[in-house]
Amino acid sequence: MEFNICVLPGDGIGPEIISQAEKVIKRVSEKFSHNILLEHALIGGCAIDKHGVPLPNETITKCKQSDAVLLGAVGGPKWDKVDHDIRPEKGLLGIRKELGLFANLRPAMVYDELRESSCLRQDIVEKGIDLIVIRELTGGIYFGTPKGIETKDGERVGYNTMMYREFEIRRIVKLAFEVARGRKKRLCSVDKANVLDVSRLWREVVEDEAKNYPDVELTHMYVDNAAMQLVLNPSQFDVVVTSNLFGDILSDEASIITGSIGMLPSASIGEGGPGLYEPIHGSAPDIAGQDRANPLATILSVAMMFRYSLGLEIEAKRIEDGVNEVLRQGYRTPDIYTPGKDMVSCSQMGDLVVSLI
Ligand code: NAD
C-alpha cells in the first residue's frame, strides 16, 4: 500500500530519535512491501530560526496532505526568550488545531523487564500495567465560555465554563469504544456525574453509544476514585475515556507510574484527517546531540501510527514485539539502564529494533 508521512523532527533530541523511527518505518515498508514516502518539514525552534515562526504555512500544507504526521519534540533554552506569540510550543498547539485533533491517546504500560522503574510497589506492578487514557482535547473547561476574572461586590472573581456539546462527547466515546474493541474490550468512562451536570450528559451519551458496542464491557468511575485506583490497582484498567481537564491530570498520573519517560508514545486523532504521533517527552536539551536519548517512545509512536492512521495492525504489533524483544535481550539506553544490562546509544537502539523486525 502507499502512504505519505509528514515527518517533523523539531528541536533538541528530536532529530536523533526521529532518525531511529525513520529506520523502523523503512524496515517495515520493505518487510511488508509498502510504499511509504517520508516528507520532512520544520516546526518549533528550528522553524523560528529559518522562517521567524514556529509553524510555517508550508509545514501546515505538508501535514494536511499526508496520511499521518510523526513529530519529535520542540523547544529548548535557545528560544526561551523569544516573543511569547512565536514560542516553539505555539507550533505544537497550532498544528494540533490545524489538524482538528480532538482525541489524545496515551498508553501507559510497564514492560516486564522495566518493572523496577515503576514508582509503585512491586506487588502492584506484578499484576501488569497496560492501559490507555483517551483524553478529549478540544472542548471542556479549557475552551468553554464565559470565562474571565472580574470584580464583583468589591472583590475579584475568577470563573471558567465546563461545557460539552453532545457531538463532542459522542465522537470521542465512539473512538474509545473502537480502541477498546481492538484491545481487551474493557472501557472505563471517567466523570464527576455525582456533582457536575456536564458529566451527567457525558454519562448519558456514553450509555447511549454503548448500545452499539455490546461486546465491550463498560464501567463508569468518578474522577477522584479513578485517581486513586490508578495507583492502587492500575491493572484493572484497559481503556479509560474522559474529558479534557480530567484527562490532562489522569494521563500524566498514568504515565508517571510507569517510571520511564523515554518509553511513552502518544497519538492525537482528528476526524478523517491525518493523526499526529509523538513521544510524550520534550526535546531534552540536556542530552541533545550526544546520541544518548531513548528512541523507543518515538518508535512506539510509529507503531501507533501504523495501527490508528494506516490501519496496519500486524505491522504495528511487529514493531511493539521488536521493542519488547530488545528489552528482553537486555539492551538499555542510559535513562533505563540498570547494572548487569547492556548500555547502548540512541542509534544502536534504533538498529537493534530494526534488526528484530
Ligand atoms: P523533557 O521531557 O525534555 O526532559 C525531562 C527530563 O527527561 C530530562 O532530564 C531529559 O534528559 C529526560 N528525557 C526526556 N526524554 C528523554 C529520552 N527520550 N531519553 C532519555 N531521557 C529523556 O522536559 P523539559 O526538560 O521540561 O523540557 C525541555 C524542553 O522541551 C522545553 O523547551 C520544553 O518546553 C520542551 N517540551 C516539549 C514537548 C513537546 O515537544 N511535546 C513536551 C514537553 C516539553
Image (tube, rainbow, N blue to C red):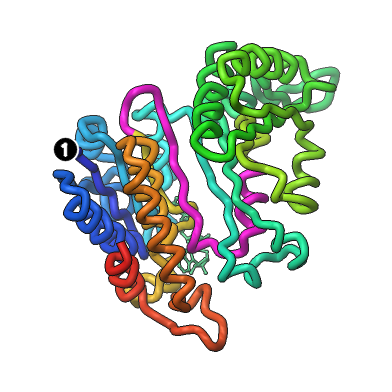
Q: Is residue 88 visible?
A: no
Residue located 54% across and 88% down the image: 340
What percent of the width, then of the height, locates residue 256?
64, 57
Q: Quadrant of residue 63?
A: top left
Residue located 72% across and 24% down the image: 159
Residue 12, compared with residue 168, is above or below; it is: below
Q: Quadrant of the C terminus?
A: bottom left
Residue located 76% across and 44% down the image: 227
**Highlighted range, magenta:** 249-274
Q: Is residue 243 visible?
A: yes
What percent of the width, then of the height, locates residue 41?
21, 46
Q: Is residue 164 left or right of residue 61?
A: right
Q: Amino acid at mark 1?
A: Glu
Does the magenta run of residues contain 138? no
What percent of the width, then of the height, locates residue 89?
42, 46
Residue located 44% across and 83% down the image: 343
